[in-house]
Each structure stands twice: as structure tokens, then as C-alpha cells.
Amino acid sequence: MHKPSGEVAFRPAEFMEELPVPNMDVWSWVLLAIGVFVALSAIVRLMRRRRDQLLAELTAQAREEQHKKQLAELEEKKKQRKRAAKAA
């Protein structure tokens, strides 16, 4: 593979060889796993709580809009009845 001068080819294998691998014993892995579990549990709990809040807000909005629509329909029916009564 020929690269123009000035550019260095990226070789992942060489890059990985240069990185130091953490020397972790069993207890370190256990603590890491516990930390990951706690973090993920907290994120899931927060996401569920937010989902429930949004669902409650949207449900309330939908109920309010339905109520307004029903009131508007009742008002329109009353107006039609008055017009029909005047015409008769």
C-alpha cells in the first residue's frame, strides 16, 4: 500500500500493541462490574421516570383537547337548534 509522502498509514494492530493493558485482578473486575451495573441501573431508572412523566403530560393534554372538542360540538349543536327553532 503506497501512501503519498507526509502521510502515515494507520495500523490498528501496532496502535493496540503500544497501549498498556490494565493489570486488573479479580476484585478490580468485580468492582468494575458492580460500578457498571449501578450506573446502568440508575440510567434506566431515570429514563423510565422521564417516560412516565411524558406519558402523563401527553395523556392530560389529549384529555383536555378532547374535552374542549366536546364542548365546542355541544355549543355548535345548541346554535343549530336555535337556528332551527327560529326558522320554524
Image: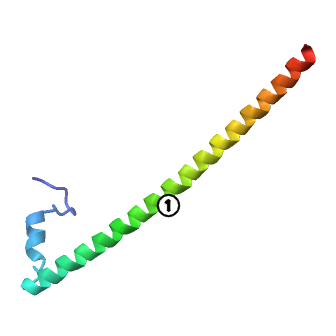
Q: Residue furthest top?
A: 88
Quadrant of the image occupied by residue 43: bottom left
Q: Is residue 49 visible?
A: yes
Residue 45 lies, with reference to residue 61, above or below; the image says below
Residue 87 lies, with reference to residue 72, above or below; the image says above
> Residue at image x 79%, y 33%?
75
Residue 48, horizontal then vertical, whole percent: 39, 62
Q: Is residue 38 left or right of residue 70?
A: left
The residue that label 1 is drawn on is 53
Q: Residue furthest right?
A: 86
> Of the residues shown, which amino acid type is indicated by label 1?
Gln
Number of marks = 1
> Residue at image x 87%, y 21%?
83
Q: Is residue 25 left or right of residue 87?
A: left
> Residue at image x 70%, y 42%?
68
Q: Nearer the viewer, residue 30 or 65?
A: 65
Residue 59, horizontal then vertical, whole percent: 54, 50
Colouring convention used in this rendered image of the protein:
rainbow
Residue 30, horizontal then vertical, whole percent: 13, 81
> Residue at image x 49%, y 54%?
55
Residue 69, horizontal then vertical, whole percent: 68, 37
Location of the C terminus (image quadrant): top right
Residue 69 lies, with reference to residue 28, above or below; the image says above
Q: Residues within 10 Å of mark 1 (few under 14, many from 20)?
A: few
Q: Is residue 81 left or right of residue 41?
A: right
Q: Is residue 24 visible?
A: no
Q: Secondary structure at mark 1?
A: helix
Q: Nearer the viewer, residue 45 or 84?
A: 84
